[in-house]
Image (cartoon, rainbow, N blue to C red):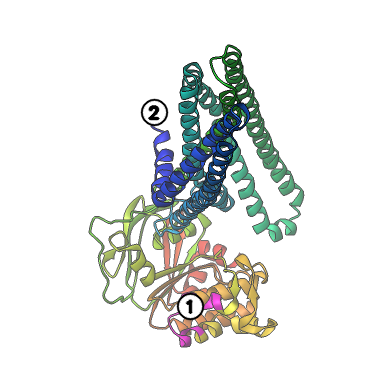
């Protein structure tokens, strides 16, 4: 067993073990159904023997009645067995989807590293469905094994050579089918990877469609997607060819095996070793065995695809956390958040040994000459990543010592590219709001009141996924209102006004200052309007603190600051 197979097999085991009840019920009923199916040829043979060979009309009618009872039983068992198996399958897929979504949304992060959003969506839908289908495949496999076992026992009672032929030939046939499924498993995994990649690129391009049109890059984007789509199509065709080749060869082997069973049975009947009724039963059983053998072929294909998908799901569920979920301190508790931030020797990404103190209630502007510095700072303050060196402390407690849920209640980081959610404008603003009063004040301070007046249904106006039904400026103001309405003790804003006009920006700057009075606020920006209302501005240049002071002071005294803010 390869070590790389273990995580995927663990996902398969969890999916199966989580549906034990329905799996057992489905398997038992499937066994009953296949037993009934295998008994039908026997009963037909006995009826032929009694009615045709012996001329016993009463015996014929009695066995025909028995046959009718068996038909009713196998019909009922098939219906409820298939229902239980299908319920287990879809429930297992649903639970996997839930686990994947929980992992993707976990505050520790890390699940989306190196993956486009569309890739995660494909894994949570198609791959989860394929793993869920393995549960149904097990039910079908148990049914097929039961059918073969009962058929072999009946054939042994009719003729030892026929029974031995089935008992020895079936395992050999199944082994060959298993070998034939290996290429399908490999190509199925590649197919899902390429399909997920194509889905991710498509989602990425649609999300940035306006930007692409604005810079005239539509053709380059189309060419990129066409290349990825062609790769996905090629992988799908290879997987389809492997599946078709497997099905064709398995059908040929199955047909040859059944032909051999019929041939041996015919020769035994010709020699008088078995009667007419027994020959009819043998031929009918040989035809019946097509079902279980074909079922095994289908089961192998489902297992091959399920194993490939389980490995992909395991990669997401087992992805390393971007930050530690269980700090060694056991999780410190902040009973009252004053809002004092202290950075000591902070190094992460492009940042190098940054020292910075922010007092409770202070509004501090942070200007970076390199956008990478701003991004690195936001990652550390929001604890989307732990620093390579140094510490960030809130009220004297290191962020790494705080539980992530408590940290993000006390310290809110509002990213520049924050998305809106599908719903209404009001739904988005109140997503994290503490009070109705905070919501109303946030709408005014962020300039969202102007947006609301311009919309057809005001606050009840519908917003499409990611807010694409709104303009860039409208989206930005609604996102800012959402951050302000949360009323966090410490708020970090990153370029909250880049998509609004100068007049609106000046109004928003005053609104943020007034609304956040007395609470710690950090504004990472190069906007003169926002920087002018801060208590103090810190300049990060070359990955470290280069200057600190008032906005007007730095404009007059620091060339690097003037270039970053006024250029």
* 320 lies left or right of 173: left
> In the rendered view, would you say 115 is above or below 180?
below
What residue sits 35% from the left and 63% below the top?
A: 404
**SS of the residue at dot 2?**
loop
Residue 36 rendering spot, x and y as whole percentages: 51, 40
Q: From the viewer's perspective, is residue 54 above or below residue 367?
A: above
Question: Which residue bears the numbered disc 1?
Answer: 484
Name the outermost residue toward the left. Answer: 329
Q: What mark, if any, has residue 409 been given in the picture?
A: none
Residue at figure coordinates x 26%, y 65% from the top left: 397
Q: Which residue is mark 2?
A: 1
The residue lying toward the viewer, choosing from 321 and 353, is: 321
**SS class, disc 1:** helix
- Seen from the viewer's position, the closer of residues 475 and 491 is 475
Work out which quarter of the rendered image holds the N terminus and state it: top left
Q: How would you rate the neighbour count of disc 2 (Cα within 10 Å): few for under 14, some for 14-19, many for 20 or more?
A: few
Does 217 sit left or right of 395 as displayed? right
Q: Which residues are magenta?
A: 427-439
131 or 147, which is in the foreground? 147
Quadrant of residue 343 within the rendered picture: bottom left
Q: Per the image, is 234 magenta?
A: no
Residue at x 40%, y 51% (from the top left corner):
21
Q: How many marks?
A: 2
Residue 318 in view here: no
- Residue at (58% x, 83% y) in the render: 507
- Position in image of residue 408 (x %, y %): 39, 67
Q: Earlier in the sequence, mark 2 or mark 1?
A: 2
In percent of width and height, residue 253 lies at 60, 21
Spatial separation of the CA atoms under disc 2 and disc 1 = 54 Å
Q: Residue 419 in the image: x percent, y percent?
A: 56, 65
Please tell me whether residue 436 belongs to the stretch shown in magenta. yes
On the rendered structure, is 388 left or right of 150? left
């Amino acid at each position: 067993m390869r070590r790389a197979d273990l995580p995927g097999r663990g996902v398969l085991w969890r999916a199966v073990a989580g549906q034990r009840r329905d799996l057992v019920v489905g398997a038992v009923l499937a066994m009953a159904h296949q037993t009934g199916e295998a008994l039908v040829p026997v009963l037909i043979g006995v009826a032929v023997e009694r009615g045709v060979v012996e001329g016993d009309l009463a015996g014929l009618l009695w066995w025909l009645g028995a046959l009718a009872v068996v038909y009713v039983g196998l019909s009922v068992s098939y219906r409820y067995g298939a229902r239980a198996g299908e319920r287990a399958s879809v429930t297992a897929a649903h639970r996997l989807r839930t686990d994947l979504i929980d992992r993707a949304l976990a505050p520790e992060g890390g699940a989306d590293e190196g993956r486009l959003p569309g890739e995660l969506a494909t894994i949570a839908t198609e791959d989860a469905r394929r793993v869920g289908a393995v549960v149904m495949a097990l039910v079908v496999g148990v049914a097929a094994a039961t059918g073969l076992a009962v058929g072999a026992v009946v054939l042994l009672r009719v003729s030892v050579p026929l029974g031995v032929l089935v008992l020895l030939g079936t395992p050999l046939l199944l082994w060959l089918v298993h070998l034939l499924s290996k290429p399908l498993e490999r190509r199925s995994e590649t197919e899902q990877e390429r399909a997920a990649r194509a889905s991710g690129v498509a989602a990425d391009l649609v999300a940035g469609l306006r930007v692409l049109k604005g810079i005239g890059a539509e053709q380059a984007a189309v060419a990129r997607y066409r290349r990825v789509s062609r790769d996905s199509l090629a992988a799908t065709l290879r997987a389809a060819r492997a599946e078709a080749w497997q099905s064709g060869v398995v059908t040929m082997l199955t047909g040859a095996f059944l032909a051999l069973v019929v041939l041996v049975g015919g020769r035994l009947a010709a020699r008088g070793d078995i009667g007419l009724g027994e020959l009819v039963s043998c031929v009918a059983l040989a035809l019946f065995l097509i079902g279980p053998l074909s079922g095994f072929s289908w089961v192998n294909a489902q297992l091959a695809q399920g194993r490939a998908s389980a490995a992909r799901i395991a990669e997401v569920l087992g992805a390393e956390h971007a930050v530690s979920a269980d700090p060694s301190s056991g999780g410190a508790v902040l009973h009252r958040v004053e809002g004092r931030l202290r950075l000591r020797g902070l190094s992460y990404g492009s940042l190098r040994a940054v020292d910075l103190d922010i007092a409770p209630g202070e509004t501090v502007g942070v200007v970076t000459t390199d956008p990478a510095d701003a991004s690195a700072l936001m990652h550390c303050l929001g604890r989307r990543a732990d620093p390579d060196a140094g510490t960030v402390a809130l009220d004297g407690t290191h962020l790494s010592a705080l539980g992530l849920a408590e940290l993000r209640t006390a310290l809110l980081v509002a990213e520049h590219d924050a998305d809106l959610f599908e719903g209404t404008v009001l739904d988005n603003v109140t997503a994290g709001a503490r009070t109705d009063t905070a919501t109303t004040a946030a709408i005014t301070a962020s300039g969202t009141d102007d947006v609301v007046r311009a919309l057809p249904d005001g606050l009840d106006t519908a917003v499409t996924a990611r807010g694409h039904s709104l303009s860039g400026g409208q989206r930005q103001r609604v996102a800012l209102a959402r951050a302000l309405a949360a009323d966090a003790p410490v708020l970090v804003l990153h370029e909250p006004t880049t998509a609004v006009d100068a007049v609106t920006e000046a109004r928003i700057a005053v609104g943020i200052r007034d609304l956040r009075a007395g609470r710690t606020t950090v504004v990472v920006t190069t906007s003169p309007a926002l920087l002018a209302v801060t208590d103090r501005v810190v300049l990060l240049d070359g990955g470290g603190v280069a200057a600190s002071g008032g906005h007007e002071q730095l404009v007059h005294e620091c060339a690097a600051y003037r270039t970053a803010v006024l250029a």
